[in-house]
């Protein structure tokens, strides 16, 4: 795969919706962040990150100023993004404003993208183990319901590419935060943890229909030529960007 991004099939029927996750290909960042890095705090030259951002926006025909990004502090706080920009101290946000694109940065954690075709509301969440333990999916859907009247059963969701349960090894202190169905012993005091399954079940538990939840078939650690993996690359790597939002309506004179 040399494409700069992948588009989730679950959103394919919605022509004015932008929903995607970038790969690590198609940018200007040098090794070890080669090459389409969007992480500003990775040791990369900020000029490279800015060029990568502008390259993606040009491909999508959107303004760089329309992108909203989150502080991603491994919590469950959700904010309402009414315009592009940086939203500190949150790990998820929601919007119903056309022309605002919610962005989540990841390199092993899972990006969760949400869309309600009935209200036009979108949501995006950063689901690491802490966010998953705090049920950030339900928090985000709840914020969409309160702000826009969203019904979870109307929504589509995509669990993007992260580190899968075959490769995500954690200690007992983390594993014990999750039900036994999501963890598998791998070594003394160690477990393989399936965060994708955790988030799928949390979305369904919050009222979503399971057939309306898509899951990436890739793994950041297993498909490292396509995606950044913080664990596999021992922290010296870049970040992918996942986006969701509705295009502005173009008026024809």
Image (spheres, rainbow, N blue to C red):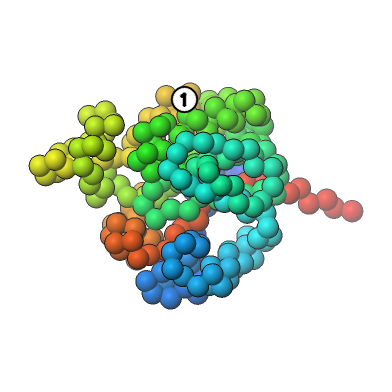
Badge 1 crowding class, 10 Å Cα cut-off, few under 14, some 14 to 19, many 20 or more, is some
Residue 248: image location, x then y, percent: 73, 49
Q: Which residue is drawn at 65% across and 60% down?
A: 64
Residue 210: image location, x then y, percent: 43, 30
Residue 223: image location, x then y, percent: 32, 59
Q: How many marks?
A: 1
Residue 200: image location, x then y, percent: 39, 34
Q: In this view, does 21 lie above or below 79?
A: below
Residue 69 seen: yes
Q: Which residue is drawn at 47% across and 36% down?
A: 76
Q: Mark 1 points at which residue?
A: 206
Q: Residue at x 38, y 61 (%)?
A: 228
From the viewer's perspective, tell me whether residue 102 is left or right of residue 212.
right
Q: In this view, does 208 lie above or below 168?
A: above
From the viewer's perspective, tell me whether residue 122 is left or right of residue 213.
right
Q: Which residue lies furthest to the left in this view?
A: 188
Q: Which residue is drawn at 33% across and 61% down?
A: 235
């Amino acid at each position: 795969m040399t494409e700069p991004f992948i588009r989730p099939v679950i959103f394919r029927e919605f022509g004015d919706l932008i929903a995607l996750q970038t790969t690590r290909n198609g940018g200007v960042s040098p090794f070890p962040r080669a090459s389409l890095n969007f992480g500003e705090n990775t040791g990369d030259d900020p000029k490279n990150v800015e060029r990568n951002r502008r390259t993606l926006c040009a491909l999508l025909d959107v303004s760089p100023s329309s992108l909203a990004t989150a502080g991603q502090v491994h919590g469950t706080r959700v904010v309402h993004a009414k315009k592009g920009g940086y939203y500190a101290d949150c790990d998820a946000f929601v919007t119903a404003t056309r022309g605002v694109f919610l962005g989540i940065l990841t390199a092993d954690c899972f990006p969760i993208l949400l869309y309600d075709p009935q209200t036009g509301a979108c949501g995006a969440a950063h689901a690491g183990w802490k966010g998953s333990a705090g049920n950030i999916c339900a928090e985000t859907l709840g914020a969409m319901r309160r702000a826009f009247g969203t019904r979870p059963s109307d929504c589509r969701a995509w669990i993007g590419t992260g580190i899968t349960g075959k490769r995500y090894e954690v200690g007992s202190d983390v594993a014990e935060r999750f039900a036994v169905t999501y963890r598998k012993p791998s070594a003394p005091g160690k477990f393989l943890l399936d965060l994708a399954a955790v988030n799928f079940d949390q979305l369904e538990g919050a009222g979503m229909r399971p057939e309306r939840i898509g899951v990436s078939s890739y793994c950041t650690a297993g498909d490292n030529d396509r995606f950044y993996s913080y664990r596999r690359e021992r922290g010296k790597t870049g970040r992918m960007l996942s986006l969701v939002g509705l295009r502005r309506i173009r008026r024809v004179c």
